[in-house]
Image: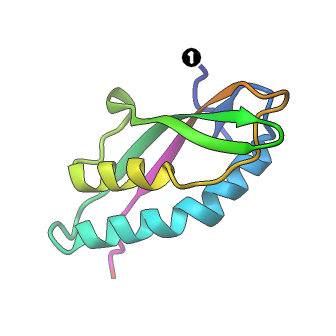
Amino acid sequence: DPAPSDSGAALLPSLDREYIKTAIREQLVPVARECYESALEDDPKLGGKIMLSFEIVGAEDVGGIVEEASVVDEESDLASPFVRECMRESLLGVEFPAPEHGGRVEVHYPFIFAADDD
């Protein structure tokens, strides 16, 4: 399995790494922030890491959809089951281009959450 790289996303070379990061930043980060801020109401000191693992599948003419989205428990320490499930479910709605020549691309993507101290 690919391991997280220093730049965030680790994936097989058949889909552009920058495009993955941009799609996550534009489509998932705003929802992730909502998931996290909702959980902060119950636990104001909540923080930690969630590692998401997912596959982008499809054909070049159809587009890419997310399958097999999961939280990698052994690489995640954020203690909120709500945030973990909210992120996993939200990831299923992110749109990507199809992997080159169709097929599947596996991605591991870390998210770090920290409560504001002000």
Colour scheme of this structure image?
rainbow
Q: Please give the range of residues in magenta.
A: 109-117
Residue 110 percent location from the top left of the image: 51, 43
Quarter assignment of residue 22: bottom right
Q: Between 26 and 42, which is closer to the camera in this rendering?
A: 26
Residue 34 percent location from the top left of the image: 39, 71
Residue 111 is one of the magenta-drawn residues? yes
- Residue ID at (25%, 60%): 46
Residue 28 percent location from the top left of the image: 54, 60
Q: Secondary structure at mark 1?
A: loop
- Residue ID at (24%, 55%): 82
Q: Residue furthest bottom?
A: 118
Q: Residue furthest front?
A: 62
Observer able to see residue 53: yes
Q: Between 21 and 6, which is closer to the camera in this rendering?
A: 21
Residue holding disc 1: 1
The answer to whether 77 appears left or right of 89 in the picture is left
In this rendering, the answer to whether 32 lies above or below 116 is above
What is the count of numbered marks? 1
Observer able to see residue 80: no
